[in-house]
Amino acid sequence: MPTITTLRHAVAEHVHDGDTVALEGFTHLIPVAAGHEIIRQRRRNLRLVRMTPDIVYDQMIGAGTASSLVFSWGGNPGVGSLHRFRDAIEKGYPHPLAIEEHSHGGMSVRYSAGASGLPFGVLRGYAGTDLPQHTDSISTIQCPFTGESLAAVSALNPDVGIIHAQQADRDGNIGFWGIQGVQKEAVLASRRSIVTVEEIVDTFDSRVRVVLPSWVVSAIAVVPRGAHPSYAHGYYERDNSYYREWDEISRDRNSFDEWLQHHVYDTEDFAQHLAMTPDLAGV
Amino acid sequence: MVTQLDFETDLTFTADEMMTIVASRELSDGNVVFVGIGIPSTAANLARLTHAPKVVLVYESGTIGTKPTRPPLSIGDGELAETADAVVSVPEIFAYWLQAGRIDIGFLGAAQLDRWGNLNTTVVGDYDNPTVRLPGAGGAPEIAFNAHKTMVVLRQNPRAFVDHLDFITSVGHYEGHDSRSALGAAGGGPSIVITDIGVLRPDALTSELVLVSLHPGRTIDEAVSGTGWDLRIADDLATTAPPTAAELAALRELSGS
């Protein structure tokens, strides 16, 4: 049975300096509020894991929470570069960021292996690419039945898996629908997990397609619009203009620092940050 | 925006429109197409709304058979899920659908491409000390490896069409001849590269990309100077059919322009 608590307490209890932390959500249900809270509590030396580091990881990297990043695609979807991510990798600012780089197929197999309690997973891929020579967690294995050479990737087992879902029920079961990404695997692969939700309900919406039983979740926090600027299907739409505006905010170190101070360090919680963000769509 | 006038049809169109329309013409009813954002997504939806209503669109966010009314900004926009025949998880889309060979055509873009259609979306310069850090692989390596064939859409200039890739992110015809299949790649690799200047296809024997068509008004000199290797030109070099009024109208309605 998870603790139903505030996001501040959930992060304080479950996310520690030096942890391997995975925030998942594939374009939909991205746990942005949790990322902000990790920044606000000034965690350091994290090994951040995420298939698609986008705005929330740009913020976490720019704020100096991470010493390494495990990922497969780092960009601002539909817009362009992640400037804080690039500044860290190209210029070592605010400090160097070690990278462990995969493809989406490789990352999803690593999560599935981690969720399955296996030490590695297999896929058909990576051969002929330059990724294996730069990434130690990619190797090859011969199929014992056919002799085919396949890629092997080590399992991912984060210390903490963090996701955002539409609903929790009063018993602490988690329900979500729409694009499901790799959230289920991320929670099941992780030693501890935090789930932020739009609301707590008596009975799940009939659209719920994925249910995570209460006993695989460590903590739940209610954070309305906690996935903004991504979206929560049935609750609010993707804030496309915010993704475009982030390109400007993040391009320059000073304007990013100013944003960080006003929107994260000077705010009590995500709701205060949202209150400073005009024109929220689709409420 | 640079526009071009086709003197026979008296229609003006941009290079992006030409590339999108050429890509859409490659798709037929019943094709299962794995698409990314940008020209691939627009082209696949244009095909669906014009000559190939039964083309099946698959996005890596796990939406299968999706039918958006507008080109999405991200591969996970809500409309993709709302209009899909099925929504599956990311591990499932890559394992059961792509890796298992259920995708006919994969659409790819890149920062760099070489004469074999290998692609770089990872880094410009040295990996450990990059000049430009690009977003990285995403799902492209698996699409390139496992789709029955791939289509590449990329503007042709010497920065993109390079003699030697800074990084191989996704395998095309690898080192030519049968080197791709020797890697264990399931799919057939790039069957077409569509640029702002023309169309390239792999040579039947060597798999080296050959310029087979020039878009209306474009020249061999432009194609050669836009290519960082000694570009081969087909003996029977064709001229790409210009966009029709119907194609342009459908594309502009789709794009909201």
Image (cartoon, helix red, strand yellow):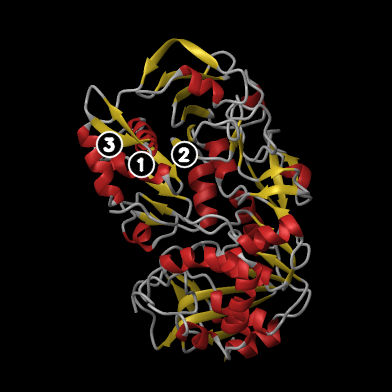
Q: Position of residue A46 (x, y in %)?
A: 74, 71
* Secondary structure found at label 3: loop
Task: Please identify the quadrant where the C terminus of chain A is shown.
Answer: bottom left
Q: Position of residue B97 (x, y in %)?
A: 48, 45
Decide if residue B183 is in sight here: yes
Position of residue B151 in the picture relative to residue B18 (left or right): right
Relative vertical location of residue A153 with respect to residue B9 in this rendering, above or below = below
Position of residue B173 in the picture relative to residue A95 (left or right): left
Chain of the residue where label 2 is placed in the rendered structure: B
Chain of the residue where label 1 is placed in the rendered structure: B
Asked if the residue under mark 3 is in contact with the one under mark 2, i.e. CB atoms within 8 Å, the reply is no
* Secondary structure found at label 2: strand
Give the residue at x 50% y 39%.
B108
Q: Which mark is residue B107?
A: 2
Quarter of the view holding residue B199: top left
Asked if the residue under mark 1 is in contact with the one under mark 2, i.e. CB atoms within 8 Å, the reply is yes
User: Which residue type does callout 3 highlight?
Assistant: Ala
* Secondary structure found at label 1: helix
Residue neighbourhood size for the residue with mark 1, other residues' Cα within 10 Å, grouped as few (<14), some (14–19), many (≥20): many
Quarter of the view holding residue A206: bottom left
User: Which residue type does callout 2 highlight?
Assistant: Phe
Residue neighbourhood size for the residue with mark 3, other residues' Cα within 10 Å, grouped as few (<14), some (14–19), many (≥20): many
N-term mark: 1 or 3? 1
Task: Please identify the quadrant where the N terminus of chain A is shown.
Answer: bottom right
Q: Which residue is mark 1?
A: B44
The residue most toward the top is B235
Q: Which residue is mark 3?
A: B52
Give the residue at x 78% y 72%.
A45
Chain of the residue where label 3 is placed in the rendered structure: B
Give the residue at x 58% y 40%.
B111
Decide if residue A23 is in sight here: no
Mark 1 on the same chain as mark 3:
yes
